[in-house]
Amino acid sequence: MPDPSDPPRLTHLDETGAARMVDVTAKSPTVRTASATAFVACSPRIVAALRDGSVPKGDVLAVARVAGIAAAKRTPELLPLAHVIGVHGCAVDLVIEEEGVRISTTVRTADRTGVEMEALTAATVAGLAIVDMVKGVDRGVSLREARVTAKSGGRSGDWVRPAD
């Protein structure tokens, strides 16, 4: 058991502090799941347009959903130390709320390492797709609150973000 007073050991750094890709070769594939959320804050005008489907660029939520799924599968291309793993399932759910759009993602795999970054990438890229599609009408739109909310599987087991 590590001493709690010791500084945390960052797995993506070697003994000299240089960046490295963690070697997961000896690990056995297991079922792993991760979830993440993000929020796109929009003006009341955009929220109304999203609800009635009148955003000039088209079906914002459909585009965001597909963008999030595509992003989960491409995470290693964006994050240089992320492993290339099989994304075996990816759900991107979008809910229009009073002040914007809540994005929730869940990614699943049966591989040697977790999918937290894939879930977070899916949530943030879905949010960016929304921003891209509404920014012409609402320059003040913003992507906020991106965070991993839960993970399961692997050596470290299950984790759920405590309520704020």
Image: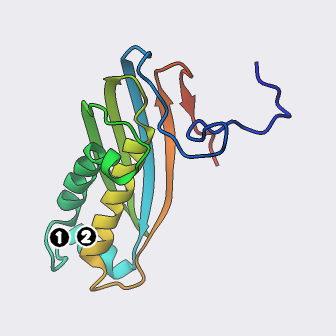
Q: Residues within 10 Å of mark 2 (few under 14, many from 20)?
A: many
**Residues under numbered marks 1 and 2 in contact, where contact means CB atoms less than 8 Å apart:** yes
Q: Is residue 30 above or below residue 50?
A: above
Give whichever of 137, 28 is nearer the camera. Answer: 28
Residue 29 place in picture, x, y as percent: 36, 17
Q: Which residue is mark 2?
A: 50
| Residue drawn at x 54%, y 46% as measured from the top left | 19
Question: Does residue 58 appear to the left or right of 61 in the view shown?
Answer: left
Residue at the extreme front of the image, as rendered = 16
| Residue drawn at x 41%, y 66% as measured from the top left | 40
Question: Does residue 75 appear to the left or right of 51 in the view shown?
Answer: right
Residue 47 place in picture, x, y as percent: 33, 73
Q: Which residue is mark 1?
A: 53
Question: Does residue 112 appear to the left or right of 158 in the view shown?
Answer: left
Q: Amino acid at mark 1?
A: Gly
Any mark on residue 30, and which? none
Give whichever of 63, 51 is nearer the camera. Answer: 63
Q: Amino acid at mark 2?
A: Leu
Q: CA distance from mark 1 to mark 2?
A: 5 Å
Q: What secondary structure is marked by label 2?
A: helix
Question: Does residue 121 appear to the left or right of 163 in the view shown?
Answer: left
Give whichever of 141, 79 is nearer the camera. Answer: 79
Q: Quadrant of residue 114?
A: top left
Q: Residues within 10 Å of mark 1 (few under 14, many from 20)?
A: some
Q: Quadrant of residue 130?
A: bottom left
| Residue drawn at x 82%, y 30% as measured from the top left | 4
Residue 124 place in picture, x, y as percent: 39, 57
Residue 129 place in picture, x, y as percent: 28, 65
Q: What secondary structure is marked by label 1?
A: loop
Residue at the extreme right of the image, as rendered = 5
